[in-house]
Image (spheres, rainbow, N blue to C red):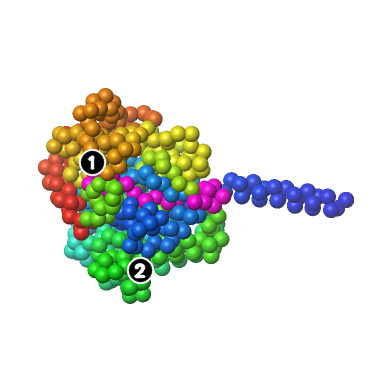
Amino acid sequence: MKLLPITLTTCLLLCAQTLAAVEQKPNIIFVLFDDMGYGQPKCYREGTEFKTPNMDRLAKEGLRFTDAHSAASVCTPTRYGVLTGRYPSRIGQYGVLTTYSPPIIPQTRLTVASLLKQNGYDTACIGKWHLGMDWGGKPGTEKTIPVGTRLVMSPNAVGFDYFYGYTHARNIGTVIEQDKVEANVEEVETQPRLAKKLVAFLDHPARKEKPFFLYLPLCPPHTPIVPAPEFVGKSGTKGKESPYGDWLYQGDWVLGQVLEALERNKLADNTLIMVSSDNGAAGRSYAPLRGAKTSIYEGGHREPFLARWPGKIKPAAVCGDTICLNDLMATCAEIVGAKLPDNAGEDSVSILPDLLGTAKGPVREATVHQSPKGDLAIRQGPWKLIFLKNGGRELYNLQTDLGERNNVAEANPEVVARLTALMKKYIAEGRSTVGAPQKNDAPMLLEGSGGGKKGKKLKQRGAQEVALALNPDFD
């Protein structure tokens, strides 16, 4: 008789543990390469000259999207969209920021990090920030800030429990931890330091106690091209391309460090990892796509996008649905069962149905893109309508003309009218998703758009940011 209570208690305990396992929230990792073109990973172009074994591994073990896009064709605005789920054109952000540019994400705006933090996650950003930092002035130069200098507002203020990285590629050697400059190092040393920090983060015992969100914005293959000595010549890339190929290979190696740490700590099975890039390759176009970084054409914003979630995502799957990097926020919200308020994630759509293979049709009604010049575009189904800053209109059917060579606007006035009306609706309502209308923080103009910031100083700063964005070696 004494055995019965013990057996019953054991049974109840096992049931409770099983229920907890079922309800356990997944860890979420979002890896963002910098300037990686759609045609660079081998899993996207068989004849590539570059080695990306860990991206190729994810393609085999998870899902490969073939129609994924960034909201912009340069760095800063894309990253704004990733973390807020909002089109950067709504704040007039077309260019890229500098070392002392103020933060463009206010503390009052919900981010992916603050959303997940509210839902019990530890949150970390390790890598390139490029969304503005408040230093309380200019304590150093554009390239170097003295060790010990503290930030007035750091990434910690918008939801990240931990930050380790740098402001942007031009001062990659100034390394910041939390809200203080930790070190000034040679450029070649920064990426290895970041790799050690991310491995330490994943190896920490706390990772087994709470779910975590890791945002990992890498530097490669963006300039400066500084492969560590142990990677020089290891990519097999020939001639003058060798340093670039080694640098890209080192970035893929960092991804491999993440995968190894997940396996070592038995975290892989309950981790959703997504890998993409912020825009097209700088000065490198990959047929059949037209254009590269800074372009409103597909080469500027069509990105590689891979996702692995063991037991949830089928291995070696391919999805042709159109998605946007902005969709990270709504996807995370659906995963944790959170409802986004009307003033958050206005342009974010959950891609969870695509990830799980349960989608009955396109998850997005349409997708908006921008270039630093101020060109805007709207994509719906096979159709892409471009609103050039100079007032011109171009319409392409990407199903039959992925290279965007044949402007069919004149032959399809009804499509132009329909997409123009939809774009105007998105602008007027301050959102492209269901919810209460919101106000844009800057004018979104279909002619003369770009850098639409109020005030003389802000307009001047906007023009400077656009000029920097058009310099492929800056951001």
Task: Using residue 176 as the reference point, say whether residue 27 is left or right of it.
Answer: right
Q: CA distance from mark 2 to mark 1?
A: 34 Å
Residue 382 in percent (x, y) is at 33, 35
The amino acid sitting under disc 2 is Ser
Q: Looking at the picture, tell me which residue is in the foreground, 355 or 455.
A: 355
Q: Which residue is mark 1?
A: 405
Is the residue 409 above or below the residue 76 in the image? above
The amino acid sitting under disc 1 is Arg
Q: Looking at the picture, tell me which residue is in the foreground, 10 or 47.
A: 47
Residue 42 in percent (x, y) is at 38, 58
Q: Secondary structure at mark 2?
A: loop
Magenta-drawn segment: 295-316
Is the residue 188 above or below the residue 285 in the image? below
Residue located at (17% from left, 48% from top): 466
Residue 282 in percent (x, y) is at 24, 55
Q: Secondary structure at mark 1?
A: loop
Q: Which residue is mark 2?
A: 235
Is the residue 334 above or below the residue 185 in the image? above
